[in-house]
Amino acid sequence: MAKEASHVCHAELYAMTPLQEFFNAVTMLFPTIALSHFAMNWPHPLVILLLLGTVSHLPVSFTYHMSVAFSRYEDRLDNDMRRLDQSMQHVLGTVFAYALSGSMFYMFINLVYNVYAIILLWDASTSNDGRRWVPVMISVCMYNAPMAWRQDYENFVIAFLSMGLGGMSFIPVLNKKLFSGWGHCIFHVALFLYARALAQSASKIAL
């Protein structure tokens, strides 16, 4: 009973209006548009790989948010499309790890971790424990780390700040109280600057 009550409170904290979910879907186009533009300016194989990784995630994320906007799920958090959305974030994390390091070995390390994280997403005992964001953030930190390792501090700081500040608007309590439910959209818009930092950094890697 207590577990059910906790789940209800958790769901209410994450609740957004259909209009907000509609724009959550639309603003997911921003990172893909940004990387398409940067791939034309910096036609480097690893920048193009960043674009392909983002394109692979876009249809799933767009479908998830649009489905929630049209009330396709009884529970907007505990459903397979959301699990697939977050699974694709881990796939993207593995691709980005290579794009930002140029190292197959480092990509393999990320692959092992991200496969483990995807298993947690689909395991019934951990798939809806309220901590699914933790493996995602670890994956983000892992694929961003090579920028600092390569001493590309400018793009590393820009990526860190844009993800961090944009991510703050994504935090449920702040999203609800400070941004009136529009925090998710704000986060997606902030990904434009984030994508630029990643693309510029990847373009510096000699293959």
Image (cartoon, rainbow, N blue to C red):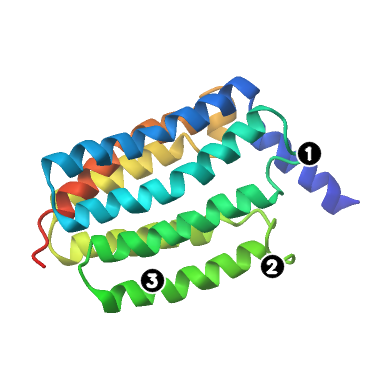
Q: Quadrant of residue 140?
A: bottom left
Q: Mark 2 — residue?
A: 123
Q: Residue at x 59, y 32 (%)?
A: 66
Q: Earlier in the sequence, mark 3 or mark 2?
A: 3
Give me the C-alpha separation between circle 3 and circle 2. 20 Å
Give percent across and percent down for residue 92.
40, 57
Give me the C-alpha separation between circle 1 and circle 2. 20 Å
Give percent across and percent down for residue 132.
59, 56
Outermost residue on the bottom side: it is 105
Give me the C-alpha separation between circle 1 and circle 3. 34 Å
Q: Residue at x 72, y 35 (%)?
A: 72
88 relative to 76, above or below: below
Outermost residue on the right side: it is 1
Q: Mark 3 — residue?
A: 110
User: Horizontal placement of 59 versus 128: left or right?
Assistant: left
Disc 1 secondary structure class:
loop
User: Horizontal placement of 116 versus 203: left or right?
Assistant: right
Disc 2 secondary structure class:
loop
Q: How many marks?
A: 3
Give the amino acid at mark 1.
Glu
Disc 3 secondary structure class:
helix
20 relative to 137, above or below: above
Label 3 packing within 10 angstroms: few (<14), some (14-19), many (20+)? many
Q: Mark 1 — residue?
A: 74
Give percent across and percent down for residue 131.
61, 57
